[in-house]
Amino acid sequence: MSVLAAMLGMAAPAAFAQTARSGPATTATIPGEGGKVQESNEWTVGIAGGLLEGTNIRFAAEMAKVLDDRPRLRVLPIVTYGALGNVEDLLYVKGVDVTITSADVLDEYLRNGTLAHIKDRIRFICKFYINEVHIYVRPEIRTLEDLNGKKVSFNTVGSAANLTGGILFDRLHINAQRVFINNSIALEKMRTGEIAGVVHVTGKPTDLFTKFKPEPGFHFLAVPFSKDLLDYYVPTQLTSADYPNLIPPGQSVDTIGVPQVLAVYNWPQNTEHYRRVARFVEYFFDRFNQFQKPPFHPKWKEISLSSSLPGWTRFRASEELLAKPPKAEQPDRLEAPTDSGEQDSPDLLNRFGNWPATTPLAR
């Protein structure tokens, strides 16, 4: 290679970078790819799930598998910090259109006053499954009261453990020293005695505990159901079938559960954001029966699309679909357009309009 060629080769990346920096583009495109940008963003819906060791992110991933129908709909599951943080992500983070959160989240924001008019800003698509409260403790801890004054991990800030666990301890007047670290790390700190227990709120069984090597005397703590928990919570159990490595055969531990919620922002009708989420809802309702079959998570069988949720208002597109007469035969999948230019189905067009091509949206 000549010296000149080498110099030109070295200069090319810098020249390209200068060209990229000088333009108004906000994506890593090159000239002529504008149509690809529009196609990639126009009908993409991001779902804020949760931490990798939680159940919510698995549900987000399973929705992506079933609902993805590019270019008409693309679903992206997003790993996030959990139920509490997911609401803020829905409000403020670009690309987050749908979230999985907990039924008690709105009351928590109302109580602490950090998000104004929160009940007017958030709507629910449907009530989801139950997340169980797991309180795993060292041998010397026998009751919840024994945790008074002790260090207890409530997972990372923004997680369901942070939300529901904090509400639970407040209502039951348990004054533990709350620390907020990833619970997989907290479990290791339990071995050394640095932490007395962990609070983990997720759908059972969860990998955090199914894969945990038990220490002698470590155990799940019973959480009694009381009148202070009647608004959102339900009594439930952790069983040996759920955690055969941690609970002796045939035994169970009483605990409480909190419903999860598939939630969206309350977009005004006739906006592009509303149409995008409405299309997601249409696909979700039409293909819902697929989720209740293997190989998907068994907790899909707990979900009823029509279940009400105290304190929450249903998203308008969901309300309209529930008001329609049931179809004689519900198809497993919406038909994709053919190469001959087949248009969207009349049912979709009548409900949400013809969705003319638009430029990518920014929140």
Image: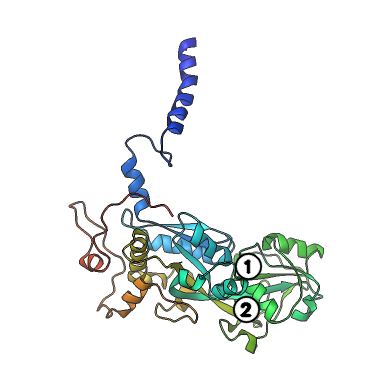
Q: What residue type is labelled 2?
A: Leu
- In the rendered structure, which disc, 2 or 1, sits on the residue that comes first in sequence? 1
Residue at the spot x=33%, y=68% of the render?
282
Q: In which quarter of the image is the C terminus?
A: bottom left
Measuring from the top left, give residue 5's x and y in whole percent. Answer: 45, 14
Answer few, some or many: residues within 10 Å of disc 1's Cα (few below 14, many 20 plus, some between 14 and 19).
some
Asked whether the beta carbons under mark 2 and mark 1 sit within 8 Å of each other, the answer is no
Closer to us: 335 or 280: 280
Closer to us: 202 or 148: 148
Q: In this view, does 151 lie to the left or right of 39?
A: right
Residue at the spot x=52%, y=60% of the render?
89
- Please indicate, yes or no, whether residue 2 appears anywhere in the rendered image: no
Total labels drawn? 2
Q: Indicate which disc residue 258 carries.
A: none
Query: How has the structure been colored for display?
Result: rainbow
Q: Which of marks 2 and 1 is in front?
A: 2
Residue picked out by circle 2: 238
Measuring from the top left, give residue 342's x and y in whole percent. Answer: 19, 57
Measuring from the top left, give residue 174's x and y in whole percent. Answer: 74, 78
Q: In this view, does 356 lie to the left or right of 78?
A: left
Classify residue 25 by image quadrant: top left
Classify residue 290 by image quadrant: bottom left
Residue picked out by circle 1: 210
Residue at the spot x=43%, y=81% of the render?
307
Q: What residue type is labelled 1?
A: Thr
Distance CA(mark 2)–CA(mark 1)? 12 Å
Q: Kindly state the secondary structure of the residue where label 2 is placed.
A: strand
Answer few, some or many: residues within 10 Å of disc 2's Cα (few below 14, many 20 plus, some between 14 and 19).
many
